[in-house]
Amino acid sequence: MNNTLDKKTSSLISLCKRAGLLRAGEENCVKALQKGEAKLVIISEDASDNTKKKFVNKAFFYKVPVIVLGSKQELGRLTGSAATSSIAITDMNLSEKIKDAIGSGG
């Protein structure tokens, strides 16, 4: 895939972070999925194939949509860390807005 983080999507992800509605990093994302908190999982395009497979399988099991988007550095910048390969959005409304923004191209 060749999805990039546009301004609107970046703003929505940043809003999730500020509102405490985002879990960053593999371990936190897995916990959010297992607890039923995750409404959307975003995996970086440059995550390892193993990481992508792991999250696609877990998200499928828990019936949570997955999007491959951006780079580890882009996701990390939005979450306040150096780099992260996965984030989970825990709010249904914001996850829908992010999916709409990505689907409409911004």
Image (spheres, grey):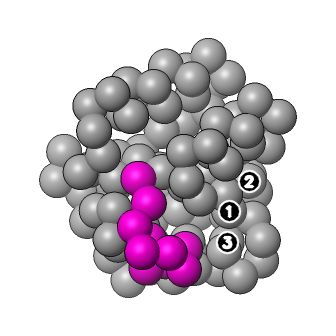
Q: CA distance from mark 2 to mark 3?
A: 8 Å
Where are the magenta residues, as a range? 76-85
Closer-to-camera residue (79/66):
79
Q: Position of residue 72 (x, y in %)?
A: 34, 62
Instruction: Place residue 3 in its image quadrant.
Output: bottom left
Residue type at tag 2: Thr
Quadrant containing the C terminus in the rendered view = bottom left
Please report contact status of discs 2 and 3: CB closer than 8 Å, yes or no.
yes
In the rendered image, residue 94 lying in the magenta stretch gets the answer no
Q: Position of residue 88 (x, y in %)?
A: 61, 51
**Can residue 5 be seen here?**
no
> Does 29 sit above or below residue 89?
above
Identify residue for label 3. Answer: 16
Residue type at tag 1: Leu
Residue at image location 39% in from the left, 34% down from the top: 51
Closer-to-camera residue (2/34):
34
Mark toward the start of the polypeptide (3 vs 1):
3
Instruction: Place residue 53 in its image quadrant.
Output: top left
Mark toward the start of the polypeptide (2 vs 3):
3
In the rendered image, residue 79 lying in the magenta stretch gets the answer yes
Residue at image location 75% in from the left, 65% down from the top: 21
Give SS at disc 2: loop
**Can residue 49 be seen here?**
yes
